[in-house]
Amino acid sequence: MDYGDFFRFTKQERRGILAFLVITIGFLFLIDRLKPAPVAHEHDLSRFYLSGDTINGLSEKDQEFQGSDWELIKDEYTRKFRDEKKAIKNERFAFDPNSISSDSLMLLGFSAFGSKNLVNYISKGGRIYNSQKFKQIYGMDTTLINELEGLIRYPVKAEKSFVKTDSMSIVKKPEKVQQVVELNAADSLTLDALKGVGPYTVKKILRQREKLGGFLKKEQLLEFGLMPDSVYRTLETYLKADPALIQKIDINTADYKTFTRHPYFSPETVNAILRYRKQHGDFREPGHISRIISLKRETGEKILPYLKVEK
């Protein structure tokens, strides 16, 4: 076998190979020419740096601004903040720092942080007998304490009495007797005398008592958030509520507005009562609300003590 035959091409084959090589080279050259040239981007990095001529982090231009317009802006902001603070009207009333609640302290203008610290200090057994001790409570505004000086009622520090014995002297401390308070008959002064209850809490209790017509049980103080749980637990044994003193609603004569003023009567409950009354006539007794099919049992049990039927 002659291997030279593999490398012999006819004239027509040689022309085809030559044409193929020319086309290939031309195609590669064309691709290289059409490829986009890389563009060099010059990024402006000056905005990420302070200018060369800076003093304390401010350029000369910023220093000039700070010395002119900046002072005007700062003065305007300070004046606006001061005017807004003056616009907040704080209440003024006499109080004992040893029995006032945190919400009442905030009504006077004290911060929530300082008010909480004072209440915690008193709850741990601390006592405030003078303004100097008052100002030592962390977070208290000493300027505000000076402004309220005439309204602050400090307790008289009881003198310790000593009983001599053969071996030692025994110190006797006077004990404060807390009276039992009936929530439906107590006035503002009686409620304010409760330890840990201040004027603000008294207002909330009286306002809710008026809406309800009276408290059915003392636990409603917690149900409506009228005082903190910690205060309620210390006073629980000194509180009571007499259901006989409740001002009840006449189910046969009350209108929609009268019903909905009461916290326990939702619009759906009132509409159900009024529809039933229109279809079936007056209720013979309050317990007949159980005949209203759409009225849930738990709702009926809650509103029933506040209903009556005039004979």
Image (cartoon, rainbow, N blue to C red):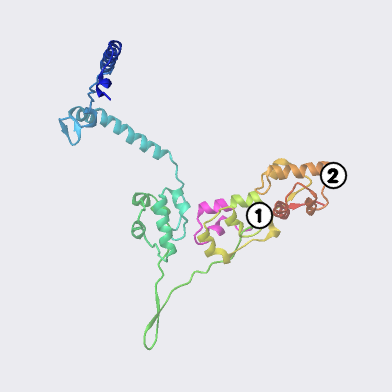
Asked if residue 97 shows in the view, the reply is no
Locate residue 66, reporting x and y percent: 23, 31
Locate residue 196, reporting x and y percent: 49, 60
On residue 39, the disc is: none
| Comes first in the chain, label 2 or label 1 | 1
Locate residue 16, reporting x and y percent: 30, 12
Q: Which residue is mark 1?
A: 214
Vertical placement of 162 versus 125: above or below? below
Per the image, is 136 magenta?
A: no
Per the image, is 199 magenta?
A: yes
Which residue is rendered at x = 64% and y = 56% of the image? 215
The residue range painted magenta reads 185-205
Q: Which residue is mark 2?
A: 280
Q: Is residue 181 left or right of residue 147?
A: right
Q: Quadrant of the N terminus?
A: top left
Mark 2 element type: helix
